[in-house]
């Protein structure tokens, strides 16, 4: 089930090489300066890594879900900020490829793949609805040949640089809950779309995260993605796939934390020997490795199930829950292994811990993943 194809290995090698050569040397600097890594994202697009699981006829790499997960993992080993923007853009592109009309796909997928749209954004969350999108307040009403969108979005990854945004809005009364939502393609620069200032975050500081205001934002009737009222299911399907990406991001961050912990513990001496010879350190390293492997197996299972078609909601939730919670623990242990040095900004251990923390929150909190898993268990 988990044997890799030649294409998957190629994508993995390509991402690993670019991450080591181009991304890793810049990761600490862009974290500190919060500089948007445009040249890195351009390089990833040139390598086909912005639309990995999008058909080649739409400009994508057509390499599949496993290849997507492997690439995100490699990118995250170097820089979690770059990884999340890459992951979300892939998710947006896949969603348009899956639900778009011929025209919508032709208009946006090639641009997302080539980097002409620097990023794609997924605008679901709002100031008062994160875990419960069915409670969103943004509305869209039909006015002749247009939709008029009004409302606000919060914590939107990459929106300052997005060429196209998926924006969810209520097209039926509030009582309809999640069944009254629709999804719209909103292009950069559309009148009435206002992108707010970047958030000051704990981690993934080079990733662009902004609020949006939609003030009588008019889009043409054919900007509706999928069916009117079908927006919630589009969001849920997209997030099932996105959660594989966030699992991969968490695994990548954890892998770096482990590699640095191994190197440090062999190098650092205390009580007459390398600290790697102490059982207290060995047990931490063993737990870290076991959790990374288990997380990777869960993520690979979800990826293969997605490739086969059919629902993999529960498997993606398990992968995301386990990988993200493990990453936080692993990165925390990595700081502990590094002792005082681990708490300093000079070494990457503290960045990994700050970066890992958000993986238990975005694309569905750990509590939401448990809810999804429990529903399946109790079915
Ligand atoms: N795939 C397809 N359909 C699905 C689905 C899925 N994964 N999950 C639910 N549905 C369908 C249901 O079958 C149901 O269909 P019917 O109306 O035909 O019966 C419908 O959707 C409603 O489902 P529920 O009753 O289960 O919906 P709910 O309101 O109880 O919510 C939830 C379920 C799992 C809690 C969901 O709201 C959820 O996942 N919340 C978290 C949202 C989230 O992850 N937000 C992240 C923001 S985006 C982000 O972070 C991106 C970024 O930039 C990094």
Image (cartoon, rainbow, N blue to C red):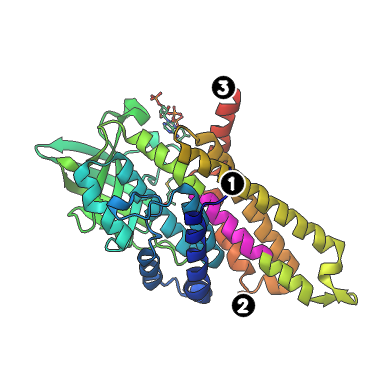
User: How many callouts does the rendering have?
Assistant: 3
Q: Secondary structure at mark 1?
A: loop
Q: Quadrant of ligand 1?
A: top left
- The percent coordinates of residue 66 (x first, y second) are 50, 49
> Which quarter of the image is occupied by the C terminus?
top right
Considering only order in the chain, which callout, 1 or 2, is on the residue closer to the N terminus? 1
Q: Are marks 2 and 1 in contact (CB under 8 Å)?
A: no
- Residue 196 in sight from this viewpoint: no
Q: Residue farthest to the right? A: 272
Q: Indicate which disc residue 379 carries.
A: 3
- Find out whether residue 323 is within the magenta segment: no
Residue at 52% across, 64% down: 13
- Residue 199 in sight from this viewpoint: yes
Considering only order in the chain, which callout, 3 or 2, is on the residue closer to the N terminus? 2
Q: Secondary structure at mark 2?
A: loop
- The percent coordinates of residue 105 (x first, y second) are 25, 47
> Which quarter of the image is occupied by the N terminus?
top right
Magenta stretch?
245-258
Q: Which residue is mark 2?
A: 346
Residue at 40% across, 50% down: 53
Q: Which residue is mark 1?
A: 2
Q: Quadrant of residue 138?
A: top left
Q: Name the front one of labels 1 and 3.
A: 1
Label 1 Cα neighbours within 10 Å, binned few <14 / some 14-19 / many ≥20: few
Label 2 Cα neighbours within 10 Å, binned few <14 / some 14-19 / many ≥20: few
């Amino acid at each position: 089930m988990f044997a890799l194809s030649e294409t998957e290995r190629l994508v993995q090698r390509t991402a690993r090489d670019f991450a080591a050569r181009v991304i890793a040397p810049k990761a600490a600097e862009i974290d500190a300066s919060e500089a948007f890594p445009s040249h890195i994202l351009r390089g990833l697009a040139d390598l086909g890594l912005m639309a990995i699981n999008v058909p080649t006829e739409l400009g994508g790499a057509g390499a599949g879900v496993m290849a997507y997960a492997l690439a995100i993992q490699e990118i995250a080993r170097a820089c979690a900020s770059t990884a999340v923007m890459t992951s979300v853009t892939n998710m947006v592109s896949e969603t348009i490829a899956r639900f778009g009309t011929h025209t919508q796909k032709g208009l946006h997928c090639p641009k997302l793949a080539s980097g002409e749209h620097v990023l794609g954004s997924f605008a679901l969350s709002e100031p008062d609805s994160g875990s419960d999108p069915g409670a969103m307040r943004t509305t869209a009403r039909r006015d002749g040949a247009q939709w008029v969108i009004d409302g606000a979005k919060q914590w939107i990854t990459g929106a300052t640089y997005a060429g196209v945004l998926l924006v969810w809005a209520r097209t039926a009364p509030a009582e309809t809950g999640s069944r009254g939502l629709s999804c719209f393609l909103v292009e950069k620069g559309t009148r009435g779309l206002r992108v707010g200032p970047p958030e000051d975050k704990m981690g993934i500081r080079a990733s662009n995260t902004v609020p949006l205001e939609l003030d009588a934002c008019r889009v043409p009737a054919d900007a509706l993605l999928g069916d009117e009222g079908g927006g919630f299911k589009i969001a849920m399907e997209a997030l099932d796939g996105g959660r594989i990406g966030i699992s991969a991001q968490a695994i990548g961050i954890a892998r770096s934390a482990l590699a640095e912990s191994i190197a440090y513990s062999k190098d650092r001496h205390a009580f007459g020997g390398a600290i790697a010879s102490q059982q207290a350190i060995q047990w931490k390293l063993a737990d870290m490795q076991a959790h990374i492997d288990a997380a990777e197996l869960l993520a690979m299972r979800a990826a293969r199930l997605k490739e086969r078609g059919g629902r993999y909601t529960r498997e993606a939730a398990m992968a995301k829950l386990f990988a993200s919670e493990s990453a936080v623990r692993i990165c925390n242990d990595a700081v502990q292994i590094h002792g005082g040095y681990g708490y300093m900004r000079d070494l990457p251990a503290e960045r990994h811990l700050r970066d890992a923390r958000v993986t238990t929150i975005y694309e569905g909190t750990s509590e939401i993943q448990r809810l999804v898993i429990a529903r399946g268990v109790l079915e």
